[in-house]
Image: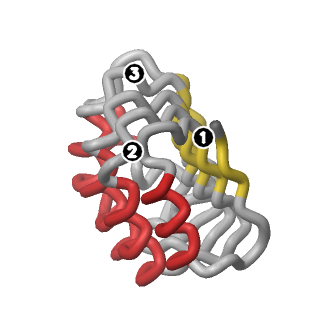
């Protein structure tokens, strides 16, 4: 089962939906929802119990470093995750270490999209993340 959340639904509503679907949810598309750091922190608490999640799309939001660090804490519990899209956010290299630790635990990750996610330099996350990726298709 998958959930596609249309433009600007409150993250609290999404967290409640995710909590009710924790055992069956395999796909969560939250792209283009104006998710900010505080929303990402709320969302990260809800993501913790989604061990069956295969696809997580958080592209084209307003996630910055604090939100990315909060999400990194939740990513470790998503052991089955195969696709993660963080493209078109505002992540700087300050959070690359937290992201790389979380991604290192995702052995099933096959596709990671970080295009236009970095505000300081196109390859700002490149060095921190490459060391932790196994056999993943990486888009920078």
Real-space Cα separation, disc 3 to disc 2, in angstroms: 15 Å
Q: Nearer the viewer, residue 63 or 91?
A: 63
- Say the numbered circle drawn on residue 27: 1
Is 77 placed left or right of 39 in the picture? left
Residue at label 2?
50
Name the quadrant of the N terminus.
top right
Q: Nearer the viewer, residue 137 or 25?
A: 25
Whether pointer 3 and pointer 1 mark residues with C-beta atoms closer than 8 Å, the reply is no
- Identify which residue is drawn at 49% across, 57% down: 18
Tell me if mark 3 has few (under 14), some (14-19) or many (20+) residues whose alpha carbon lies within 10 angstroms of its own. some
Real-space Cα separation, disc 2 to disc 1, in angstroms: 10 Å
Measured as percent of width and height from the top left, residue 109 is found at: 44, 27
- Say the numbered circle drawn on residue 101: none
- Say the numbered circle drawn on residue 108: 3
Q: Nearer the viewer, residue 133 or 76?
A: 76
Real-space Cα separation, disc 3 to disc 1, in angstroms: 15 Å
Q: Is residue 80 visible?
A: yes
Q: Can you tell which quarter of the image residue 26 is in?
A: top right
The single residue placed furthest to the right in the displayed view is: 6
Task: Say whether disc 3 or disc 1 marks the residue closer to the N-terminus.
Answer: 1
Nearest to viewer (mark 3 / mark 2): 2
Measured as percent of width and height from the top left, residue 105 is found at: 24, 33
- Identify which residue is drawn at 68% across, 60% down: 31
Q: Is residue 56 above or below residue 71?
A: above
Measured as percent of width and height from the top left, residue 97 is found at: 23, 53
Whether pointer 2 and pointer 1 mark residues with C-beta atoms closer than 8 Å, the reply is no
């Amino acid at each position: 089962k998958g959930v596609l959340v249309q433009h600007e639904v409150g993250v609290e509503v999404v967290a409640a939906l995710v909590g009710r679907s924790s055992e069956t949810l395999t796909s969560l598309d939250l792209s283009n929802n104006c998710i900010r750091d505080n929303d990402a922190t709320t969302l990260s608490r809800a993501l913790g119990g989604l061990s069956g999640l295969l696809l997580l799309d958080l592209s084209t939001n307003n996630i910055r470093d604090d939100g990315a660090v909060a999400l990194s804490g939740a990513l470790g519990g998503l052991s089955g995750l195969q696709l993660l899209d963080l493209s078109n956010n505002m992540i700087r290299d300050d959070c690359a270490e937290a992201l790389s630790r979380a991604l290192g635990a995702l052995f099933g990750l096959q596709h990671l999209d970080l295009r236009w996610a970095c505000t300081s330099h196109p390859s700002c996350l490149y060095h921190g993340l490459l060391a932790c990726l196994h056999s993943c298709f990486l888009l920078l």
